[in-house]
Image: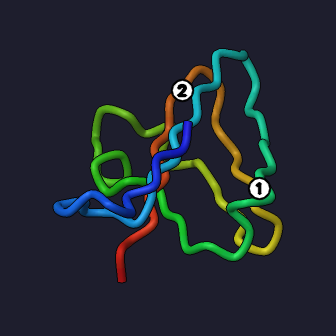
Amino acid sequence: MHIDGKGYRDAKYKSMTVLFNVDKVAREVTIGELKGRRLAVHKRQRQSTNDLVARTSVYDSASGALMVPPRSTVVFVENSQ
């Protein structure tokens, strides 16, 4: 799921991308439209002491590929700056 923050007056992020992985193994998804963007795992997930798995998520700007750990939901955000 991808949400564009454009047009939302109080949006904190330029965009948000949410990925769900219900499989028992990590999955990589390449989304060409995300190529070259500056995405990062949402700070709540990066700082969480309860969900250490989400921290292992990876985004490759050169290809637009996102790696999502097994049985997890990860929120990637693109800052407005």
Q: Which residue lies at the image location 33% right of the left edge and 61% below the top edge?
A: 7
> Which dot marks residue 52?
none
14 on left or right of 22: left
Sequence-wise first label, 2 or 1: 1
- Mark 1: which secondary structure? strand
Residue carrying label 1 = 65
- x and y percent of residue 54 in the render? 49, 41
* Quarter of the rendering occupied by the C terminus: bottom left
Residue 49 lies, in percent from the top left, at 28, 41
- Please identify the quarter of the rendering in which residue 72 is found: top right
> Do the CB atoms of the residues marked 2 and 1 lie less than 8 Å apart?
no
Camera-side residue of 40 and 36: 36
Q: Position of residue 32 (x, y in %)?
A: 80, 58
Q: Nearer the viewer, residue 48 or 29?
A: 29
- Pointer 2 residue: 72
Q: Quadrant of the N terminus?
A: top right
Q: Residues within 10 Å of mark 1 (few under 14, many from 20)?
A: some
- The answer to which quarter of the image holds residue 8 is bottom left
Q: Relative to residue 48, is residue 71 drawn left or right? A: right
The kind of secondary structure element at disc 2 is strand
> Which residue is at 55% across, 74% downward?
38
Give the amino acid type for the residue marked by disc 2 in the picture: Ser
- Cα gap from disc 2 to disc 1, whole angstroms: 17 Å
- Count every numbered label the image shows and give the total: 2
